[in-house]
Amino acid sequence: MTAIHDPSRFRVGTLVYSRASLVTLFAWLLWGDFVYTLMESVMPSLLPMMLRDNGASNQAIAFIVSSIYMVVNAVANPIISYKSDRFRSRWGRRRPFILVTTPFVVILLALIPFAPEISQTLGGAGWFAGLLKYSPVTSLVLISGVLVAAFQIFNMFVSSVYYYLIADVVPAAFIGRFYGLFRVFGTLAGLTFNYFIFGMAKTHMHEIFIGMAIFYGFFITLMCLRVKEGEYPPPDEKEERGHWWSGIRNYADECFGHPLYLLIFLVYGLNIWAGASNVFGIFFSRDQLGLTLDQIGKMSAYIGVFSVIIIYPLGILLDRWGSHKSMIAGLLGSAVLKLISFYMIHDYWSLLLWSILCSIPLCLSGLAIMKWLIDLYPRERYGQFGSAGAMVSSIGAALIGPLCGLFFDYVKDYRYVFLWAVPFYLAGAWTAWLVYRKWKSMGGEAGYRAP
């Protein structure tokens, strides 16, 4: 029997698939990614405009859109990931976290565009006016911040656990091609939002949020009901009997006790921090270049189409170069092209051209980092180490987000969205090279074992 027809390739844990059932699994998981990415497109794309048009400052926008998520990610993600790894139920260890929190995500997402109306209504209440006397921010920023923070807390259960569900139910022999399709479907979701929905934001802001909340809630719940988890070995009895602080100590010792992981977390963080200025990109296109929302949305869709076309060839390149060299090349290429974009973009066509060119190294590093982390993290604790990297990047982003907002308040030129990312990508490439050297010294492709 050839390796292609080896039955073991269709197993993961106690789950055994036929070709047809594996295709069905892929279909539901990829559709779930499409729905989730479509929902996730709403917040960073539409919330900044709503806040800006209601008088919020750049610093407030950066805090609400970026920093709140990063704080929640830093605090909640490690707890959720650690508990999910060790949770057992007849529904599995991942799906219950998604099913229980999805209704709260739906309600809060639908409420967020009503923040200005809620702010005005509460403004007439004496107790709220008294509260605002002690608040350093406006009522709109306060109400928006509370709603977004609550949304991010419940959404964190989905955004973290969903990726661990993939590792639990997709056979290892097919994980590479799954992640290739995963990127395609995520890009298609962004393309759909930008081409068909974004241009209506000016006149249908409320309807977009409400409609997306209902669409998301229905299909994510349906996906959880259709995707089945297998049986897991019981959690470590020693950990179960230990006090809660012993879990924290165990987590810290395993994740932060080796310098290699600290470098990996730093690369991951630098890649995230480079995008802190992305929230202001809409203002460069709309306010400085004079583009309409419809033009901006369709341009993003064109870039998405291009990304879908190049993902598979870049996947082939990733297989040939390996994850380390691909990561370094992607980060260096992003730094160079962002720097050139800062000087070369001056109208619709130059923005389209250089955005397309920038998408090439960004797609390469985006693909590479998935394989890079799988190559470097311990497989049995992948979720735990993934959450540790997310915590480091989120703490940094929570601090960098408001600084980015202050930076744009100071320079008063949104063209700097391109220049902002350059030092982060350069530092990320250098640190990734240090990781590559350590990986080679620890055995490289043939002998590396995660410490």
Image (cartoon, rainbow, N blue to C red):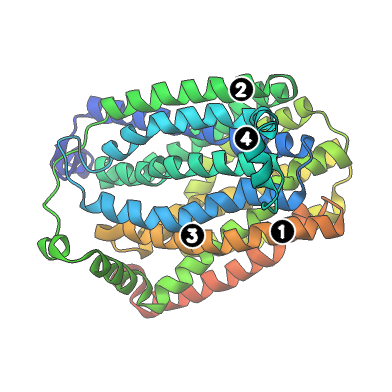
- Mark 1 in CB contact with mark 4 (< 8 angstroms): no
Q: On the rendered image, what quadrant is the N terminus found in?
A: top left
Quadrant of the drawing holding the C terminus:
bottom left
| Residue 171 picture quarter | top left
- In this orientation, which residue lies closer to the viewer: 268 or 171? 268
State how far apart marks 3 and 2 are (Cα).
42 Å
Image position, residue 84 (x, y; %): 27, 49
Q: Could you tell which of marks 1 and 3 lies nearer the N-terminus? A: 3
Mark toward the start of the polypeptide (1 vs 2): 2
Q: Which residue is mark 2?
A: 208
- How many labels were placed on the picture? 4
Q: Earlier in the sequence, mark 4 or mark 2?
A: 2
Q: Amino acid at mark 3?
A: Trp
Q: Earlier in the sequence, mark 3 or mark 2?
A: 2
Residue at 70 percent across and 54 percent down: it is: 136
Residue linked to disc 1:
404
Q: Is residue 242 left or right of residue 38?
A: left
C-alpha separation, residue under disc 1 versus residue under disc 2: 28 Å
As helix, strand or loop, the secondary structure at mark 3 comes to: helix
Q: Amino acid at mark 2?
A: Ile
Residue 231 placement (x, y as % from top left): 13, 42
Circle 4: residue type: Gly
- To which residue does mark 4 refer? 304
Q: Position of residue 27 (x, y in %)?
A: 36, 27
Q: Is residue 414 above or below residue 261?
A: above
Is residue 268 visible to the viewer in this orientation of the structure? no
The reply to whether callout 4 and callout 3 are in contact (CB within 8 Å) is no
Provide the residue designation for mark 3. Answer: 321
Q: Residue at x 44, y 36 (%)?
A: 181
Circle 4: element type: helix
User: Toward which corner of the image does residue 191 lie, by quadrant?
Assistant: top right
